[in-house]
Amino acid sequence: MSNTNTIRDGFISILTDKFGVPAEETTNGAVTLDELGLDSLALVELLLDLQKKLHVSIEQGIILPEHTLDETVALIEERKGES
């Protein structure tokens, strides 16, 4: 499994387990976090979960509700590569 798939799977796992996003809604990479029901408070919680589960530190304001799943995974990969 590639690093991209590992990061994507971990991210989707957080969305489904912690935020109750149905797994079938995560198959479309163009869906936005807002469309999945994540507001600004949920994004703060998401950043904490990403740090714990994927060992990546992302500052507030980097991931926004208007980002798509694919864009968010790319941002996580970028930050993971910097650590």
Image (spheres, rainbow, N blue to C red):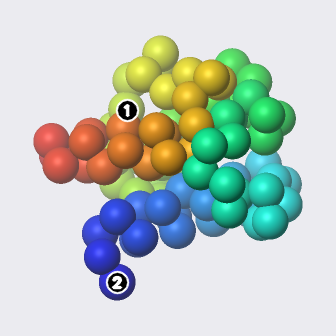
- Disc nearer the start of the sequence (2/1): 2
Question: Callout 1 environment at 10 Å: few (<14), some (14 to 19), or many (20+)?
Answer: some
Element under label 2?
Answer: loop
Report x, y in % for residue 38: 75, 32
Q: Amino acid at mark 2?
A: Met
Answer whether labels 2 and 1 touch (C-beta < 8 Å): no
| Residue in view at x 29 percent, y 69 percent | 3
Q: Which mark is residue 58?
A: 1
Q: CA distance from mark 2 to mark 1?
A: 24 Å
Q: Image quarter for residue 68?
A: top right
From this viewpoint, is residue 48 visible?
no
Q: Which mark is residue 1?
A: 2
Where is residue 13? Give x, y as percent: 63, 65
Quick check: 52 above or below 48? below
**Residue 18 horizontal/vertical position (percent):** 74, 54
What x and y, as percent, mark residue 28?
Answer: 67, 55
Point 47% across, 16% down: residue: 61
Relative to 7, say whether 30 is above or below: above
